[in-house]
């Protein structure tokens, strides 16, 4: 059963009718959560499951995320945004940024899992703050941003100290965004105190819940990394153990590679991505948060690698 709190957030609900809206945010009222051992390289999975009875399905529902890094938000296994990640930060930018998503269409009567993949910009215990709010079935307004029930663990991807990204799908062979998953190795999140806390016994304003003044919302701003186009490079240079792929110049790319016939544990370097193979018949390697501006991508590997294992290279232009 959702905890319903009678509050005045009509302005937020109307401003969030777009799929998403962003605003620079301060630290007021946030309930920050982080992995108990945060660092500046590990991606973190966060997840929480809410049970909503059919008669309690909300009329409207929004999820508001504030972060110092970058993230991808899922509800019941589905990416709620068309963006590749949010926000699209410049290097060394650790400004607190916030965005709200309309998630009503992703909810279902039963267990609902909210899941978030977080990529750090720096070592901090202010990783993410998540609020869930909207209009309940009885037309009252509800909102919650507590951290009870949130679990986390280090993801199977991480940033590397050379400015790249690494991926090892062997470390967790489950769909971590789905509801029914083994959670034995997940940990309770660490809640970070802020300068002010919510007092749920008194009326709560929009600024209390979401940490910013509603007048600062700009529904037309979407500071996220969107896919502009995807193409398959045509010009490559190939030898037995090396593949050089030439990309469209003067573009920011995320590279996605389809591999076949690799050994489990085989290591392949794809530009700035360090990938550990699963040994599946076909597998995809891709950097999620680290676009490259390079005009060429060099693909090499360990002693088991052969360039024929590369079935397709796709360039996702941002």
Image: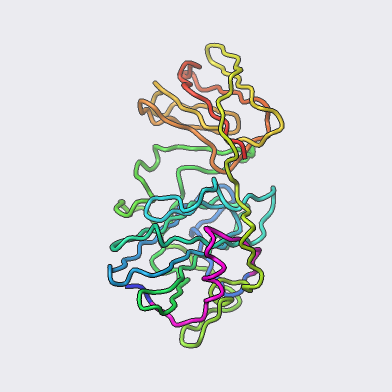
Residue 18 magenta-highlighted: yes
Left/right placement of residue 197 relative to residue 153 reads right
Q: State whether residue 121 is above or below residue 243.
A: below
Coloring applied to the structure: rainbow
Name the spot of residue 1 as percent of width and height, x first.
31, 73
Q: On the picture, is 31 further left or further right than 49?
A: right
Rendering quarter of residue 3: bottom left
Q: Residue furthest right?
A: 250
Q: Is 175 situated left or right of 156 in this image?
A: left
Furthest residue in direction bottom, as rendered: 202
Residue occupying image coordinates x 66% and y 57%: 94
Taking 280 as reference, is 200 above or below it? below
Depicted 168 relative to depicted 262: above or below? below
- The image position of residue 155, as x and y in percent, is 46, 47
Q: Nearer the viewer, residue 23 or 150?
A: 23
Q: Would residue 179 appear left or right of 97 to someone viewing this image?
A: left
In magenta stretch: residue 51:
no
**Location of the C terminus (image quadrant):** top right
The vertical placement of 153 against 304, above or below, is below
- Total marks drawn? 0
| Residue 150 or residue 235, whichever sits in front | 235
Taking the view exactly as shown, the residue that stands out farthest to the top is: 239
- Residue at 46 percent of width and 21 percent of height: 311
The residue drawn where x is 55% and y is 48% is 85
Residue range corresponding to the magenta coloring: 4-26
Residue at 58% across / 79% down in the picture? 196
Residue 291 place in picture, x, y as percent: 62, 39
Counting from the top left corner in percent of width and height, residue 148 is at: 41, 69
């Amino acid at each position: 059963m959702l905890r319903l709190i009678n509050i005045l957030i009509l302005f937020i609900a109307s401003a969030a009718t777009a799929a998403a809206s962003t605003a620079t945010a301060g630290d007021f009222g946030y309930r920050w959560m982080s992995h108990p051992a945060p660092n500046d390289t590990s991606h973190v999975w966060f997840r929480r499951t809410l049970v909503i009875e059919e008669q309690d399905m909300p009329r409207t529902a929004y999820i508001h995320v504030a972060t110092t890094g970058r993230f991808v938000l899922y509800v019941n296994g589905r990416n709620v945004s068309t963006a590749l990640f949010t926000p699209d930060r410049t290097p060394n930018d650790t400004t607190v940024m916030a965005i709200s998503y309309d998630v009503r269409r992703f909810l279902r009567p039963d267990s609902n899992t909210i899941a978030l993949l977080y990529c750090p910009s720096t070592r901090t215990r202010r990783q993410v703050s998540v609020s869930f709010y909207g209009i309940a079935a009885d037309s009252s307004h509800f909102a919650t941003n507590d951290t009870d029930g949130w679990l986390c663990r280090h993801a199977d991807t991480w940033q590397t100290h050379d400015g790249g990204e690494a991926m090892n799908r062997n470390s967790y062979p489950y769909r971590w965004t789905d509801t029914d998953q083994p959670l034995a190795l997940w940990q309770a999140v660490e809640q970070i105190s802020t300068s002010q806390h919510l007092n749920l016994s008194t009326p709560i304003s929009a600024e209390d819940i979401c940490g910013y003044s509603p007048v600062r919302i700009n529904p037309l701003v979407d500071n996220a990394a969107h896919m502009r186009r995807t193409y398959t490079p045509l010009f490559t240079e190939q030898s037995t153990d090396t593949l050089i792929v030439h990309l469209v110049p003067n573009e920011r790319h995320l590279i996605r590679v389809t591999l076949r016939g690799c050994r489990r544990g085989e290591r392949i370097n794809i530009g700035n991505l360090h990938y550990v193979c699963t040994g599946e018949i076909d597998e995809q390697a891709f950097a999620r948060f680290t676009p490259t501006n390079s005009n060429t991508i060099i693909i090499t590997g360990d002693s088991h690698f052969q360039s024929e294992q590369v079935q397709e290279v796709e360039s996702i232009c941002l």
